[in-house]
Image (cartoon, helix red, strand yellow):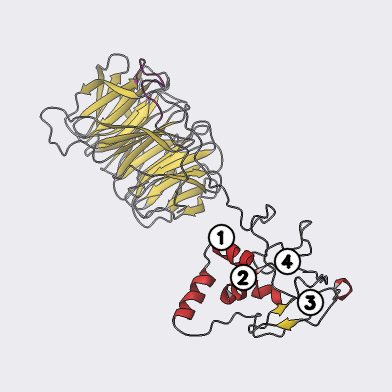
Amino acid sequence: MAIKLRNEYGPVLHMPTSKENFKEKGPQNTSDSYGHKQYPANQGQEVEYLVTGTHPYPPGPGVALTADTKIQRMPSESAAQSLAVALPSSQARVDANRSAAAGGEFRHSGASDRSQPAGVTSVVMEGGNAKNSALMAKKAPTMPKPQWHPPWKLYRVISGHLGWVRCIAVEPGNQWFVTGSADRTIKIWDLASGKLKLSLTGHISTVRGVIVSTRSPYLFSCGEDKQVKCWDLEYNKVIRHYHGHLSAVYGLDLHPTIDVLVTCSRDSTARIWDVRTKASVHTLSGHTNAVATVRCQAAEPQIITGSHDTTIRLWDLVAGKTRVTLTNHKKSVRAVVLHPRHYTFASGSPDNIKQWKFPDGSFIQNLSGHNAIINTLTVNSDGVLVSGADNGTMHLWDWRTGYNFQRVHAAVQPGSLDSESGIFACAFDQSESRLLTAEADKTIKVYREDDTATEETHPVSWKPEIIKRKRF
């Protein structure tokens, strides 16, 4: 008990008191063996004293006085012991117990090794005082109830490529979509029927990225042959090449408001190109390993990259320099996606999916559970986030709460190896009613929401559990 008193109240024992508020009646105070002042309790003589510079039951030194601070009386021994039992453990008390067990004397600075000014005592609140905020159990934060989303089901499998399907993009008019493959071809498919409309040849290695411009009838592609091409879809031929990357080009994106193309490469750089003049406007250097993904937006920061060096960088488009480097991931970042409505984005890595807030990359939360190499992320305006992984699994999440409401592992196509079940890319169509995935079994799979599902048939298995999130 003496050790507890020294630990918890030692920092305030040496504090001075206001002499004009100190009144003593009756015999002189005596000291116990620990140097604490003792006061006559039941002798019909009143003793009053004022504690200054402390909160009721001080949680630590330096706590300011509040309106609740009142004159406290020395408690009975039984009340002090019952309060000590109710106290949460602290590192100081653990250390004290360890020292006592070792036979050593535990001394707290400012307690028994200092002289005690007259009228100052250790203060212990009577158990059960509602005003004692230090002993009030704080309610742990709980995850809000996630929005209900209908499950997604597979309804079409499209075959035609002769190699892994590595990338996919839907055109702005929502009439067709385009895929790039390890068979070195780019194929254009009718979105409604799933039939092949056109094949484009020109790359001499795996096509790793495709995107359709919303501002012109152009299709852009990049691949492991270090080439970046601009295709005119009125003539179905290449009209521009963008030369400069020194190794395979892994991804590309178009700026939504200006004629700028951004590409990322295994040469550890991202490059900004003027679409019309083919000039390299900036080379974004700073990553120390291959840059796996790049995204553009009209707001600041305008360019976001994810790399195998485990970092995410937010870039200043005008200066061509890094604004912020995010180092929270511990493994390669292969996918980044921007929310279509919120000023937030998510990044995918084998350790976690993480959500961030623009413009400074403030961390929001972890989405844990997809324990695989995440190759692709996409999100719709309804808040459905999709993550696709190297092992063929696809998880669907509620964006706001991070609740994983569905897990999909589609069977590989007949004739494919069981190991060929990876998902390399996924995208929603413009109506956000269909989800397309590009996979290692050489197919494109199309999903849609289950119209027959309701909250009763597919309830949210959610409980208001305490949030257990790693912050990094």
Mark 3 vs 1, N-terminal side: 1
| Residue at the spot of label 4 | 54
Mark 2 vs 4, N-terminal side: 2
Quadrant position of the C terminus in the picture: bottom left
Asked whether 282 falls inside the magenta stretch, the response is no
Placement of 444 over or under 83, stated as above or below: above
Q: Nearer the viewer, residue 298 or 115?
A: 115
Disc 2 to disc 1, C-alpha distance:
13 Å
**x then y, percent, for residue 330:** 37, 55
| Residue at the spot of label 3 | 119
Disc 4 to disc 1, C-alpha distance:
20 Å
State which region is magenta: 449-460
Q: Residue at x 56, y 42 (%)?
A: 300
Placement of 414 over or under 365, stated as above or below: above
220 lies left or right of 101 = left
Q: Main secondary structure of the magenta part?
A: loop
**x then y, percent, for residue 277:** 44, 37
Q: What is the crowding at mark 4: few (fewer than 14 residues within 10 Å), some, or many (at least 20)?
A: many
Mark 4 vs 1, N-terminal side: 4
Disc 3 to disc 2, C-alpha distance:
19 Å
| Residue at the spot of label 1 | 86
Mark 4 vs 3, N-terminal side: 4
Asked whether 458 falls inside the magenta stretch, the response is yes
**x then y, percent, for residue 209:** 32, 36
Circle 1: residue type: Ala
Circle 3: residue type: Gly
Q: Which mark is residue 8?
A: 2
